[in-house]
Image (spheres, rainbow, N blue to C red):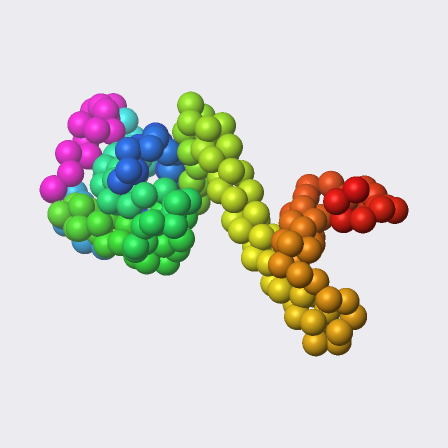
Amino acid sequence: MLSLRARNLDVEPIKVNDKTGNPVLIGLVLVWRLKDTYRAMFEIDAQTMAAGNLSATRAIALAGRMAAFENFVRIQSDAALREVAGKYPYDDSDGEIDGLTLRSGGEEINEQLENKLNERLAMAGIEVVEARLNYLAYAPEIAAVMLRRQQASAIISAREKIVEGAVSMVKMALHKLSVEEIVELDEEKKAAMVSNLLVVLCADEAAQPVVNTGTLHH
């Protein structure tokens, strides 16, 4: 008798190209079971795949058939994984992608993967109960480059926030100096003050104060 119990299958990560052509490593884990034993027995060449022989015992032959079914699921899982992964980019590191990515897709990507697997395995009487990505990373040959790209993007974003905050603080300082009449600044002095404040606020290192004992120009 064939077992109708659910089985786990951990598909080792494979290398595929995402929608933008970047090589990525992607793997999945799925839960599957035999749903239609008639289809499973007569639509899959399980005897040949299991490499059985006339002298094998019934238990060994049954184990061989189940192994053949698992091998069939593994091969179809590989094909479905390549198909789904090729439809989406790995991530949206440039902020220009409108839609799902493999990293952000989450349940939607898993749902599509499960549907593709069920389409492929229905002919063999096999049902996928659950399928989900369990490994996703750039391939080793571009991982270092992509890491530097992500770091550069993060630095640019951080700089934008720093400049935005610095401009806001300078604007607030000039406004309070004017409203509270602490000091009167002409346009030239305002420009110098803005320049100095921006240097201080946007610098990577702590500013070194310099005491000017003369005038603004000496």
Can you tell which quarter of the image residue 74 is in?
A: top left
Look at the picture and state if 118 lies above or below 138. Answer: below
Q: Position of residue 178 (x, y in %)?
A: 69, 71
The residue lying at 24 percent from left, 44 percent from top is 87
Can you tell which quarter of the image residue 164 is in?
A: bottom right
- Answer yes or no: is residue 196 visible: yes
Q: Is residue 59 left or right of residue 194?
A: left
Q: Quadrant of the C terminus?
A: top right
Q: Position of residue 151 (x, y in %)?
A: 53, 38
Look at the picture and state if 166 lies above or below 207. Answer: below
Can you tell which quarter of the image residue 62 is in?
A: top left
Residues 14 and 128: in front is 14
Does the segment drawn in magenta span residue 51?
A: yes
Q: Position of residue 110 (x, y in %)?
A: 34, 53
Q: Is residue 152 left or right of residue 32?
A: right
**Numbered label tally:** 0
Look at the picture and state if 123 lies above or below 49. Answer: below
| Residue lying farthest to the bottom in this orientation | 179
Chain part drawn in magenta = 42-55
The residue lying at 88 percent from left, 46 percent from top is 213
The residue lying at 28 percent from left, 38 percent from top is 20
Does the segment drawn in magenta span residue 186?
A: no
Residues 94 and 187: in front is 187
Q: Is residue 104 left or right of residue 210?
A: left
Residues 35 and 12: in front is 12
Q: Position of residue 46 (x, y in %)?
A: 19, 34
- Answer yes or no: is residue 6 visible: no
Residues 215 and 134: in front is 215
The residue lying at 12 percent from left, 42 percent from top is 43
